[in-house]
């Protein structure tokens, strides 16, 4: 069975070790076109000096540009984007806007250096390396980096343990992050602090890590089924309607007596997360476990029924690598509905590659569950989002934050440049071939990302390293009620330790 990463700690004193040291390596998922393995190894190990002349940001993928950059081509994507000879009017405009953005980002580095009198570097520590560095160097009082890229799952313990700088202690009360939040905002944990901050934009950071429900357009059309996007707008796209559609689309298409087309296929973790949000609920979004709630029970029952009662799901890969096989089965053209993301489609080169799909994929918000609400359902779990912390004890934390804030404001306040379709073309072109469908899919991703929730129970993971037996549920070996009864106290104990109760 699938082993998922640990998110909650067993005790607050042990919290950092458990969350950072005991976690396994994260499967790196490319949620953009700038992910990869870094080469920058700049590390400033003395962060308690009276003046900070170098700012380092600990990360786990390559980020461009920083003070080590000597040319636009230091970002390899620049040469790729500039290499093509464009003749189409739209392509020419796209190339021109991208060139302008690259130049503005590159020039912004020099502006920051001159304004603050510092050099700054992205330091690729790897995912595990970031957690190890936080766990060792900050606790020792000599943080390796001035800023760390974190996920909420290990950023929250850092805040709870007092290892992060509270921006409310170092920034003026009228700072943008506390008012209009043009470039950055902070994660409010209800403790009056502002330690975990993140980039704000109307584009990439919003649509990244969203998993809308995708569907095979031609398959639904061939079966004379009304477009789910139309049903969504009418408030008729519900779990029951989804089951109705999926049952119709689960078929024996060649008449050999064997089902060869299925209504649904999806990786179990994403299925659980998205159904939770579509039912307006979460497993652990507060200090009190919600696994035992009737709303979560409805989600578990839905999963059980999909596999055991309605039998609309493609046979699950219980022995192999379901995170790959179940995510990618749709490319065979025999799946009606499936969780999807731009990074998945880009990796499969669905459109524009050598093996381009011969059908269209459209995105829609997940159907509304019996306890959900179309207007308020979350569409994105921010737990695995891109967050940052400034370690406690770093010299000149206000300057450090301002460097990050200005770095994100490479467009100098002109959001029309930042959010231009030409700049964000990767997010459009990855999901569809037809330009109109590209825009429609992007808008669905944006809608998902605009409705954020932080659920510490993402993937059904528990604090002691065990996990909800979702595959047993899918195989009919256990019931929703049995799961809730067996694991509710485990979740509560982990949350008590996590929040220091």
Image (cartoon, grey):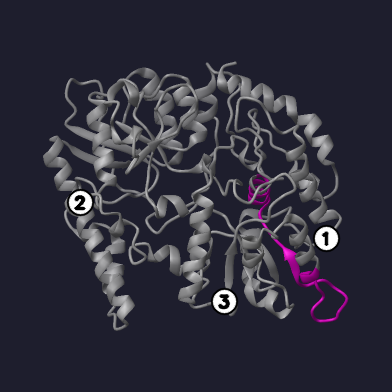
Quick one: which residue is furthest to the front in this view?
234
- Circle nearer the viewer, 2 or 3: 3
Residue 384 position within the rendered picture, expressed as x and y whole percent measured from the top left? 51, 42
Q: Which residue is found at the position 37% from the left and 56% from the top? A: 34
Asked if the magenta segment contains residue 260, the reply would be: yes
Residue beneath label 2, please? 69
Residue 98 visible from this viewpoint: yes
Q: Which residues are magenta?
A: 248-276
Residue bearing the label numbered 3: 357
Judging depth in this view, the residue of 257 and 222 nearest the camera is: 222
**Numbered mark located on residue 360 in the image:** none
Relative height, residue 240 to residue 335 (above, below): above
Residue 301: give x, y in percent of width and height: 80, 46
Query: Does 52 sit left or right of 285 as displayed?
Result: left
Task: Tell which circle, 3 or 1, labels the residue nearer the N-terminal end.
Answer: 1
Estimate the spatial distance between the alpha carbons at disc 3 and disc 1, rounded to whole Å: 26 Å
Give percent across and percent down for residue 306.
79, 55
User: Disc 1, disc 2: CB below 8 Å?
Assistant: no
Lower sequence index among marks 2 and 3: 2
Is any atom of residue 325 visible in this view? no
Name the element at disc 2. loop
Would you say 275 lies left or right of 36 here? right
Return the mark for residue 311.
Answer: 1
Q: Residue at x 80, y 66 (%)?
A: 247
Q: In the rendered image of this protein, does residue 329 appear above or below residue 370?
A: below
Rounded to the nearest angstrom, the CA distance separating label 2 from label 3 is 38 Å
Tell me the quarter of the picture where residue 399 sits. Answer: top left
Circle 1: element type = loop
Residue at the spot x=49%, y=76% of the render? Answer: 433
Magenta span has 455? Answer: no
């Amino acid at each position: 069975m699938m082993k998922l990463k640990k998110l909650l700690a067993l005790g607050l004193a042990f919290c950092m070790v458990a969350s950072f040291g005991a976690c396994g390596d994260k499967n790196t998922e490319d949620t953009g076109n700038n992910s990869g393995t870094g080469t920058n190894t700049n590390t400033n190990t003395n962060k308690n000096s009276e003046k900070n002349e170098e700012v380092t940001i600990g990360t786990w993928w390559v980020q461009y540009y920083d003070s080590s950059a000597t040319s636009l081509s230091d970002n390899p994507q620049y040469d790729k984007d500039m290499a093509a000879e464009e003749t189409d009017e739209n392509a020419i405009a796209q190339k021109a806007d991208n060139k302008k953005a690259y130049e503005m980002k590159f020039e912004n580095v020099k502006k920051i250096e001159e304004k603050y009198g510092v050099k700054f570097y992205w330091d690729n520590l790897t995912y595990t390396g970031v957690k190890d560095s936080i766990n060792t160097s900050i606790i020792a009082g000599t943080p390796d980096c001035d800023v760390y890229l974190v996920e909420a799952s290990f950023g929250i313990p850092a805040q709870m343990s007092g290892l992060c700088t509270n921006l409310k202690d170092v920034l003026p009360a009228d700072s943008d992050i506390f008012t209009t939040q043009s470039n950055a905002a902070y994660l409010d944990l209800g403790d009056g602090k502002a330690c975990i901050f993140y980039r704000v934009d109307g584009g990439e950071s919003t649509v990244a890590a969203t998993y809308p429900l995708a569907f095979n357009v031609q398959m639904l059309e061939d079966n004379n089924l009304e477009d789910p996007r139309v049903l969504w707008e009418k408030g008729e796209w519900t779990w029951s309607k989804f089951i109705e559609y999926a049952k119709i689309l689960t078929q024996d298409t060649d008449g050999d007596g064997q089902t060869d087309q299925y209504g649904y296929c999806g990786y179990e973790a994403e299925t659980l997360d998205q159904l939770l949000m579509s039912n307006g609920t979460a497993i652990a979004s507060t200090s009190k476990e919600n696994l035992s709630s009737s709303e979560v029970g409805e989600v578990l029952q839905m999963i059980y029924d999909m596999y055991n009662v309605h039998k609309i799901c493609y046979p699950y890969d219980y022995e192999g690598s379901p995170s790959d096989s179940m995510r990618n089965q749709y490319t065979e053209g025999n799946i009606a509905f499936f969780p999807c993301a731009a990074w998945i489609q880009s990796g499969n080169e669905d459109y524009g590659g050598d093996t381009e799909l011969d059908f269209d994929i459209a995105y829609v918000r997940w159907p509304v569950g019996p306890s959900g609400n179309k207007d308020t359902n979350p569409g994105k779990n921010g737990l695995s989002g891109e967050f940052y912390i400034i370690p406690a004890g770093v010299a000149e934390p206000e300057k450090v934050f301002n460097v990050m804030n200005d770095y994100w404001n490479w467009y100098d306040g002109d959001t029309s440049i930042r959010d231009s379709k030409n700049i964000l073309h990767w997010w459009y072109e990855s999901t569809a071939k037809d330009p109109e469908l590209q825009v429609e899919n992007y808008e669905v991703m944006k809608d998902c990302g605009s409705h954020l929730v932080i659920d510490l129970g993402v993937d059904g993971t528990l604090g002691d390293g065990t996990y909800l037996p979702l595959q047993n549920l899918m195989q009919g070996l256990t019931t929703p009620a049995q799961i809730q009864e067996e694991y509710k106290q485990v979740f509560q104990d982990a949350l008590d330790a996590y929040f220091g109760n």
